[in-house]
């Protein structure tokens, strides 16, 4: 897949959020930004803790921001940005959180140095466990 209109803007928002990452332990700073179909953007960065297991990834911070703003559907895309030689990839826990709200999400992977890849959550998380499974 390729980048669409507004995707570079979404990457820029994620890169800005990344600057606010709190990652003193891993030093691995991640920014994420979710765009809805109505063009609202919610961003987040990873937040670590001295009790390491309490760390929350950037993708989940962005997801919580969207949900806390009342946006629980119609998410169009997420951009994830790191400053590295290789592209980021969302962890399994974040894939599962994202699929709760946006099974058709486009996933834009980017580095501050200009690497880009566009994929889908469906490709990253086949056969997901979803709310329907509980019905
Ligand atoms: N992290 C993210 O924020 N997103 C990912 O997709 C992978 C990992 C964070 C968690 C932790 O703060 C650091 O990166 C190293 O695992």
Image: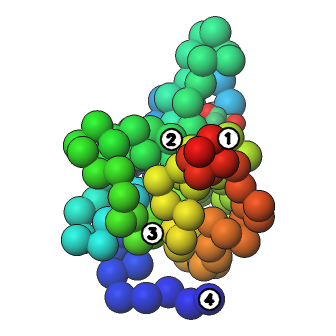
Residue at 35% across, 51% down: 72
Q: Which mark is residue 77?
A: 3
Secondary element at tag 3: strand
- Asked whether the viewer can see residue 109, the reply is no
Q: Is 49 rendered above or below residue 101?
A: above
Do the residues bearing badges 2 and 1 touch, measured as CB atoms within 8 Å? yes
- Say few, some or many: other residues with alpha carbon within 10 Å of mark 1 (under 14 / 14 to 19 / 20 or more): few
Q: Which disc, if any, is residue 1? A: 4
Residue 40: horizontal and vertical position, in percent? Answer: 23, 63
The 10 Å Cα crowd at callout 2, few under 14, some 14 to 19, many 20 or more, is many
Q: Which residue is mark 2?
A: 60
Q: To which residue does mark 1 refer?
A: 93
Structural distance between the alpha carbons of marks 1 and 4: 24 Å
Q: Earlier in the sequence, mark 3 or mark 1?
A: 3
**Among the two numbered marks 4 and 2 on one chain, the one whose residue lies closer to the N terminus:** 4
Separation (CA) of disc 3 from disc 2: 14 Å
- In primary-sequence order, the first of circles 2 and 1 is 2
Rendered location of residue 74, percent (x, y)? 36, 66
43 left or right of 52 in image? left
């Amino acid at each position: 897949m390729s980048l669409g209109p507004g995707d570079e803007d979404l990457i820029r928002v994620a890169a800005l959020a990344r600057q606010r990452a709190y990652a003193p332990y891993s030093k691995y700073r991640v920014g994420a930004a979710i765009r809805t179909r109505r063009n609202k953007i919610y961003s987040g960065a990873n937040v670590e803790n001295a009790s390491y297991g309490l760390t929350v990834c950037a993708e989940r911070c962005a997801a919580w921001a969207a949900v806390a703003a009342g946006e629980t559907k119609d998410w169009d895309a997420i951009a994830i940005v790191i400053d590295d030689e290789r592209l980021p990839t969302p962890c399994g826990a974040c894939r599962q959180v994202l699929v709760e709200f946006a099974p058709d999400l486009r996933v834009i992977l980017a580095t501050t140095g200009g690497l880009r890849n566009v994929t889908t959550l469906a490709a990253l998380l086949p056969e997901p466990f979803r709310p329907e499974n509980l019905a």
